[in-house]
Image (spheres, helix red, strand yellow):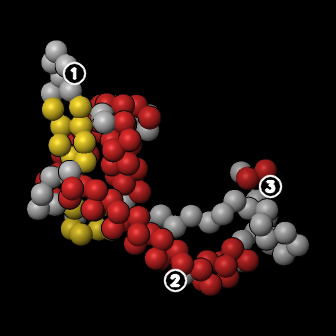
Amino acid sequence: MNDTNPTALSPTKVRIRLVFDEDAMLGPGKAELLERIRDTGSISAAGRQMQMSYKRAWMLVETLNAIFREPLVDSTRGGKKGGGAKLTQTGLAVLAQYRSFEETVAKSGAAQISVLRGMLRDIPDRK
């Protein structure tokens, strides 16, 4: 335990996976993909940034679009002007709600997280 320097560890991150059903989930990976699509305007670029194949990124987008009432990502195929992708209003709202939920859980669980951190053994060289 690192009682003398409790800040020696990196900050604790709360990573939440919401399991709506067996095939309907939203977690940190899909949220990050949505953020990267929002920021790059491209499913392919978002996937590359996450070291993920275009096929995998596209499959995740299709899953997200299928599990919500309205699509989260709107995409256009390539052509003379090239393709692109953007988050729909629903996609922006889902992402905002998910990140807000993470923040709420982290704040409300801060005391428990602190206790758990205090119970950790030393992690030499963060391995």
Q: Which residue is mark 3?
A: 124
User: Could you tell me residue 86's position as x and y percent?
Assistant: 25, 42
> Is 8 drawn above or below residue 78 in the view shown?
below
Name the residue: 38% across, 41% down. 39
Q: Which residue is mark 2?
A: 108
Q: Earlier in the sequence, mark 2 or mark 1?
A: 1
> Is 101 drawn above or below residue 41 in the view shown?
below
User: Could you tell me residue 123's position as x and y percent?
Assistant: 76, 59
Under tag 1, what secondary structure? loop
Could you tell me the amino acid type at mark 1?
Gly
Q: Which residue is mark 1?
A: 82
Q: Nearer the viewer, mark 3 or mark 1?
A: 1
Under tag 3, what secondary structure? helix
Q: Going by the picture, which residue comes out furthest to the left?
A: 69
Q: Is residue 114 found left or right of 58 in the rendered image? A: right
Decide: marks 2, 3 in contact (CB < 8 A)?
no
Residue 17 makes an appearance in the image: no
